[in-house]
Amino acid sequence: MQRRALIIGGSVGGLLGYALLRQAGWNATIFERTVGDLAGRGAGLGISQNLVDILRRIGARFEPSAGSAHDAYVWMERNESISFSHRRPTVGSTWPRVYKPLRALVPAQDYRQGANLVRITQEGDAVTAHFADGAQETGDILVAADGVFSTVRQQFLPDVAPSFASYVAWRGLAEESEMSAAALAAIGHQVVYCFPEGEMLLAMTVPGVGDDMRPGHRRIYFIWYRRTSSSELRDLFTDASGRHHGISIPPPLIRSEFIVALRDHARSVLPSCICEAVMRAPQILLQAVSDLQVPQMVFGRVALMGDAAFVARPHTAAGVSKAALDAQCLADELVSCEGDIDGALARYEKARLAFGQQLCAHSRYLGAYLEGLDQERDPEKIIRDYGAQSLLRDVEVAAFSAH
């Protein structure tokens, strides 16, 4: 009899889990809380070779034209001079370029939207998901891919929550066509780092509207980390009506005075080419940087994966790659388990728990400067260690382009 997996969450992690489990011979159904297309979520995205390999394995091939190749990481001073350059071929893309081909793999009957999970019950070898509309679904395993605010995790680990890292990230995308030629030449085919006192900004080229990679049609993406106290954080995430949004606020509700202040500060501390991107980004996004890690990933026949289990700070650029590796590990263990599902889940937990702990530790190390915990301001060291190259295989551009 074919085994059945219930997957809670229909974003990238859930889609990866679905495709890999189906490939492993399982019946799988995705239950997504929201209704509508999720392709508009996210912004810049780092592409690792691990992710490319897994996408190819399930038939959601990532084409070289879907990414923007960068030759090096450079430290740019305010006068646009380069103080340090670290050769490191990487590929940057956008979240929809990964989401869309994955979503296309799932037939409509296996992707149920508006499915708001309420609780989970287990009896014997069966696990049942109970939804707000009264519906119930039973399977052999349940995979929690429902993100940082996971309903599944909250049931089993109610005391585990994201921990604020005392700094925020401002993000934006500027159209390449609206940038000056001088600014585009200064940014070039590299990831640019800027280090105003107590801050850090990264900028790079990513695909444009419709995933267009033609020169003049791409975008410049930036992420700017700035130290923020707990009291300032509350103010930043409170809209003009006085409503507080926790640690996530819809971009249109960010108060205009904060955007004005950000752009004023950009003029005083950033190189002109990077300042231009901050000025021309039509919509600024705000994120409270936090991390999250769990002491356990398996609860009977329930398995956490992706952001439901571990959230590393953005410095690792490995969130989607980690979800892909989680899904691959789970599927591979279930294939080789010879009917011992509980044993497969135990091996999955052991492997991915260790990886998640290492990834979070590395992200905290990279963020120590921003928290004021690293007293030695050493941009060269940060640039060399940035990302998760010690845990993930970086994309080699030549090899990537050859596929």
Image (cartoon, rainbow, N blue to C red):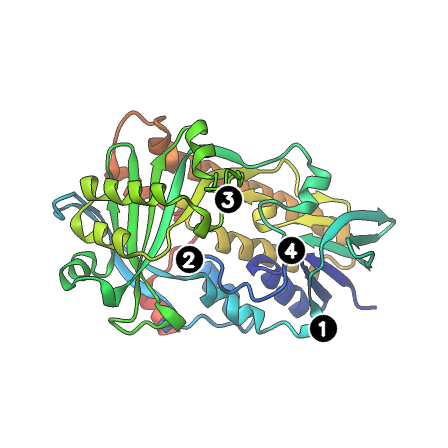
- N-term-proximal mark, 4 vs 3: 3
Instruction: List the residue tagged with mark 4.
Output: 330
**Residue located at (61% from left, 38% from top):** 294
- N-term-proximal mark, 3 vs 1: 1
- N-term-proximal mark, 2 vs 1: 2
Location of residue 40 with respect to 285 vertically, above or below = below
Location of residue 65 with respect to 332 vertically, above or below = below
Q: Rate crowding at label 1 as few (under 14), some (14 to 19) or many (20 or more) other CA atoms within 10 Å.
A: few
Kindly give the residue lying farthest to the right in the view shown. 124
- Amino acid type, residue under disc 2 in the picture: Ala
**Residue located at (51% from left, 65% from top):** 39
Q: Rate crowding at label 3 as few (under 14), some (14 to 19) or many (20 or more) other CA atoms within 10 Å.
A: some
**Mark carried by residue 248:** 3
The C terminus lies in which quarter of the figure?
bottom left
x, y (%) of residue 363? 43, 39
Examine the rendering and report whether any part of residue 191 can be seen.
no
